């Protein structure tokens, strides 16, 4: 069902193409711009359509809950998959076509308008259309319906802000969060600086007394300090002189060590020269070794070439042998073909002569008979199908009439149910009587109210007003003696009386007897016309004066006898059943006749086909022999043309062998020259080895002389090291004396520490003041951002709350949406949306969680929250997968009604609603599009599924049945 005036909006999906994806081989879906119901049996691929939308529009594979990697979505047995989504663009522009191709190796390729692009280009285009497949408020797959209720308040607030469509709202919230973090950091820094400043002030306060005592004591110690300074200076001067003497001795040792090293330099140079020569000789040796190895490789190559030539010669011999054998085989086959051709010619000459014209005429007659018989059989099949349909229609009508008849005749049961409500004791007694009727000598009848049948419902009130309520629910026993108490009927009716009460009642004789005896129903007249139609008149004579008096009672409405047995309707139904049974008999007779005729026609048809087959075989036998003779002739010609000149082939073989032998001789000569060069290279190699050995011996002798000199040099270095240690010792002693002198000259350490800490206090105070100013400025900016964001989000949540409460109220429940600010109002990281619902009158509003509500209640709340967002958000489409799972039928029906009302508005988004079923007897408006997914291996391909043709055939069948009914 689609609205002919409906139009797509920007961002709506107008086409989905899927190939080799999950359960589908290839499909194309064209949704409408409003509400799209996707229904079908479990496992056919309803949710696969939503998965295709998510994966094609850049969503993570884990969102749908069907797989962690995109390769998991490739159809089993396939190597790759293709997804394509066409998104509507307003203003007569070209629609956006996004295509994604991926394979089992996790490789994905993206296309925009047919051009390959990067994924970030697709994501940017999707974001510009306000499509958020990772937002549960817009895309709610089947496996994540429960996750919606599990979202905490903070996550729900962020998801709602993103779903609204105004990016500034979420950006302001994100700015508040970062500003809040910055504010908390500044406050923590302020607290730390205040603590450090307080500690520094307290520590410096303890040094004030020490500084004051030092100033008073300083004057008294000046003379003592002066003497100490002089003593320390003399000690330093002594140490300095000793250090100078030792340093001079060390310098003399260093000069002697340098001279010794210079004497060793020529020996070192000679060793280096010899080692260089050895290195060069070793290099030449390696080159000679490499050349010898190359020559060995060349020799191996010569061996390989020689073996190759030998194999080639063997191949030439084998090729000639094979050619010779092939020629011999060709000659044998040629002899065999000639013999076969002689046999075929003999068979052709022995064939009897056939009149072609007569054979053709007989074949035409048989063909006409076969066609006529086939047409007659087809007509019989049509007649048989029509008879079967008539029989089935009559059987269905009989079943319906029988059910209706049983319902009409069940008056007694209905009255028993009514008796149970009015008099439970009488009902229990009736149940017991039905099981124990055999205990009585004569039949005992159930209460009269269950057995009386008033011919017309309008007379029931008169009967009930005459017969007391106690007697109507009493049981009646048969007694022959009491049947003599009947009284004569009253004279003809007077005063407008139309019936006696007995004329208005049908009941067993015993009950009628009881009513006549005790209530005079055969003497009570009834008048329906006039002002007294709703009154009862009773006339009695006074015992005292003998005068007659008349008492008028109002007639109350019938309560027990208003349920009657409609005999006229029963009669009509029985007539219809009889007619349908006659139709069944006629249809069965027709089927029997058709079957007999069909058997005869099939027998004749088989005989004619066999006769035609024999004629065709006789006519075609000569033609087949001629064709086989021509085939043999062609084979003989090809065999003769394929003759091989063995002498020529043998000459070619000899030429190839001679050429190969020449090449082998040339290779042998070249191999001899290479061996000669290898011998020369080996001789030069041994010469170089001798030179290396002599040079190594000279190097060893020089190194032994150098080793002795180096031992002597080591003793000088040890002496120099000792002097260096003495210099270092005296230097340290002088530095110690100098340090004592400097220490005496410095101020007291406590005074220095006091001044240092005083400067630190001033620095800390300045940092504290700057941080406080920054905190005040940031708090002012934070408050401005809060005033921009908080009213907007509060208004948004208030509007959602109104819609949500209205939707919940229509279900007879209650709901509330509020902004939860947490314990600290300025901590925006704790802000969230709280959903409270109540599904029972005796319960209170509770927060929507997975612990407080059942699965069906969470599904209802989730669906209504998404509907409440509809009028406030501008997303182009929403996808919801089996959100009605677990809902009770009443809530499910109400929720779908509200959804259809929502999509009927101009600002509504496009909806994809997956459900395993359609609710029966539901009235769907023109904005609903139902897509039935019926996927299986044996199903007709969708491109061959012509709905118009199926509807046309259905109409033709219905018209044919209507014409047949009119004829009958």
Image: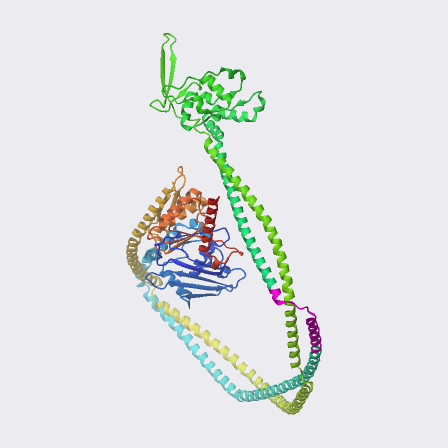
| Relative image position of residue 383 (x, y in whole percent) | 53, 49
Question: In the figure, is residue 701 to the left or right of 755?
Answer: right
Question: In the figure, is residue 37 to the left or right of 358?
Answer: left
Residue 454 vs 617, above or below: the answer is: above
| Relative image position of residue 675 (x, y in whole percent) | 66, 90
Q: Is residue 196 visible?
A: no
Query: Looking at this view, is 611 or 403 the one in front?
Result: 611
Residue farthest to the top?
544
Which residue is at a point 38% across and 24% down the rendered structure image? Answer: 556
| Relative image position of residue 257 (x, y in whole percent) | 50, 84
Question: In the figure, is residue 403 to the left or right of 499?
Answer: right
Residue 899 vs 493, above or below: the answer is: below
User: Is-magenta flag for residue 359?
Assistant: yes
> In the rendered image, which quarter is residue 538 located in?
top left
Which residue is at a point 38% across and 22% down the rendered structure image? Answer: 527
Residue 889 vs 622, above or below: the answer is: above
The part of the chain drawn in magenta is 334-360
Residue 721 vs 141, above or below: the answer is: below
Query: Looking at this view, is 321 or 124 the one in front?
Result: 321
| Relative image position of residue 865 (x, y in whole percent) | 38, 48
User: Is-magenta flag for residue 839?
Assistant: no
Q: Is residue 350 visible?
A: yes
Q: Magenta-highlighted stretch: main secondary structure?
A: helix
Which residue is at a point 56% across and 44% down the rendered structure image? Answer: 588
> In the rendered image, which quarter is residue 559 located in?
top left
């Amino acid at each position: 069902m689609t609205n002919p005036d409906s139009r797509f909006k920007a961002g709506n999906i107008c086409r989905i193409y899927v190939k080799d994806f999950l359960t589908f081989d290839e499909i194309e879906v064209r949704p409408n711009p409003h509400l799209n119901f996707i229904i079908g049996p479990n496992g056919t691929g309803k949710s696969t359509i939503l998965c295709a939308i998510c994966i094609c529009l850049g969503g993570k594979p884990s969102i749908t809950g069907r797989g962690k990697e995109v390769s998991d979505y490739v159809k089993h047995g396939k190597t790759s998959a293709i997804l394509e989504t066409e998104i509507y663009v307003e203003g007569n522009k070209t629609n956006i076509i996004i295509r994604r191709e991926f394979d089992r190796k996790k490789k994905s390729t993206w296309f925009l308008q047919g051009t390959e692009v990067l994924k970030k280009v697709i994501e940017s285009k999707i974001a510009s259309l306000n499509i958020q497949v990772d937002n549960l408020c817009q895309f709610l797959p089947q496996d994540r319906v429960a996750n919606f209720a599990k979202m905490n308040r903070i996550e729900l607030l962020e998801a709602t802000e993103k779903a609204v469509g105004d990016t500034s709202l979420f950006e302001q919230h994100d700015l508040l969060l970062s500003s809040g973090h910055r504010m908390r950091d500044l406050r923590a820094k302020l607290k730390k600086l205040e603590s450090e400043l307080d500690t520094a002030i307290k520590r410096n306060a303890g040094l004030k007394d020490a500084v004051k005592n030092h100033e008073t004591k300083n004057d008294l110690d000046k003379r003592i300090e002066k003497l100490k300074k002089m003593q320390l200076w003399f000690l330093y001067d002594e140490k300095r002189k000793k250090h100078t003497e030792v340093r001079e001795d060390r310098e003399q040792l260093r000069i002697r060590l340098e001279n010794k090293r210079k004497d060793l330099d020529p020996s070192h140079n000679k060793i280096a020269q010899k080692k260089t020569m050895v290195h060069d000789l070793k290099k030449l040796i390696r080159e000679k070794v490499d050349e010898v190895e190359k020559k060995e490789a060349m020799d191996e190559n010569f061996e390989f070439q020689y073996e190759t030539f030998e194999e080639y010669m063997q191949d030439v011999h084998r090729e000639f042998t094979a050619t010779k054998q092939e020629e011999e085989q060709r000659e044998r086959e040629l002899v065999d073909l000639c013999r076969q051709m002689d046999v075929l010619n003999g068979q052709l000459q022995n064939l009897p002569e056939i009149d072609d014209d007569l054979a053709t005429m007989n074949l035409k007659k048989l063909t006409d008979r076969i066609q006529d018989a086939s047409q007659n059989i087809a007509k019989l099949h049509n007649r048989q199908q029509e008879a079967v349909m008539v029989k089935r229609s009559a059987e269905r009508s009989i079943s319906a009439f029988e059910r209706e008849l049983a319902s009409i005749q069940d008056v007694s049961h209905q009255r028993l149910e009514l008796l149970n409500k009015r008099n439970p004791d009488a009902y229990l007694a009736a149940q017991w009587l039905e099981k124990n009727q055999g205990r009585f000598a004569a039949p005992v009848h159930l209460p009269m109210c269950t057995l009386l049948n008033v011919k017309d419902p309008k007379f029931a009130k008169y009967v009930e007003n005459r017969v007391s309520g106690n007697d109507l629910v009493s049981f009646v026993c048969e007694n022959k003696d009491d049947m003599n108490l009947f009284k004569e009927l009253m004279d003809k009716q007077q005063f407008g009386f139309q019936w006696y009460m007995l004329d208005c009642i049908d009941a067993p004789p015993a009950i009628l007897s009881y009513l006549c005896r005790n209530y005079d129903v055969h003497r009570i007249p009834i008048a329906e016309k006039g002002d007294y139609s709703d009154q009862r008149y009773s006339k009695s004579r006074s015992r005292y004066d003998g005068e007659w008096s008349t008492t008028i009672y109002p007639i109350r409405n019938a309560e027990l006898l208003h349920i009657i047995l409609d005999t006229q309707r029963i009669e009509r139904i029985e007539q219809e059943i009889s007619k349908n049974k006659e139709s069944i008999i006629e249809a069965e007779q027709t089927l029997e006749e058709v079957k007999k005729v069909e058997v005869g026609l099939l027998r004749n048809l088989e005989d004619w086909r066999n006769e035609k087959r024999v004629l065709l075989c006789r006519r075609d036998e000569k033609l087949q022999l001629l064709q086989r003779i021509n085939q043999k002739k062609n084979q003989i010609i090809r065999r003769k043309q394929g003759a091989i000149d063995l002498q020529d082939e043998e000459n070619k073989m000899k030429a190839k062998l001679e050429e190969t032998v020449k090449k082998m001789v040339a290779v042998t000569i070249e191999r001899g020259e290479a061996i000669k060069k290898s011998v020369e290279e080996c001789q030069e190699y041994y010469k170089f080895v001798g030179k290396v050995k002599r040079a190594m011996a000279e190097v060893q002798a020089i190194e032994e002389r150098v080793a002795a000199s180096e031992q002597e040099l080591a003793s000088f270095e040890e002496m120099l090291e000792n002097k260096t240690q003495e210099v270092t010792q005296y230097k340290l002693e002088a530095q110690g004396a100098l340090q004592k002198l400097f220490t005496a000259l410095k101020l007291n350490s406590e005074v220095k520490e006091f001044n240092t800490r005083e400067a630190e206090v001033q620095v800390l105070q300045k940092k504290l003041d700057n941080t406080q100013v920054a905190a005040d400025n940031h708090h002012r900016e934070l408050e401005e951002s809060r005033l921009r964001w908080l009213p907007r989000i509060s208004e948004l949540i208030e509007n959602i709350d109104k819609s949500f409460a209205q939707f919940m109220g229509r279900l007879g429940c209650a709901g509330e949406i509020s902004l939860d600010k947490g314990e600290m109002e300025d901590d925006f990281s704790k802000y969230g949306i709280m959903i409270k619902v109540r599904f029972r009158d005796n319960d209170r509003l509770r927060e929507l969680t997975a612990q407080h509500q059942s699965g069906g209640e969470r599904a209802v709340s989730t669906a209504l929250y998404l509907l409440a967002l509809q009028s406030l958000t501008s997303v182009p489409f929403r996808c919801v997968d089996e959100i009605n799972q677990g809902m009770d039928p009443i809530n499910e029906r109400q929720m779908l009604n509200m959804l259809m009302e929502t999509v009927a508005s101009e600002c509504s988004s496009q909806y994809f609603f997956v459900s395993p079923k359609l609710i029966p007897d539901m009235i769907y408006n023109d904005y609903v599009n139902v897509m039935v997914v019926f996927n299986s291996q044996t199903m007709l391909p969708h491109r061959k599924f012509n709905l118009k043709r199926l509807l046309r055939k259905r109409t033709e069948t219905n018209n044919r049945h209507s014409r047949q009914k009119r004829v009958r």
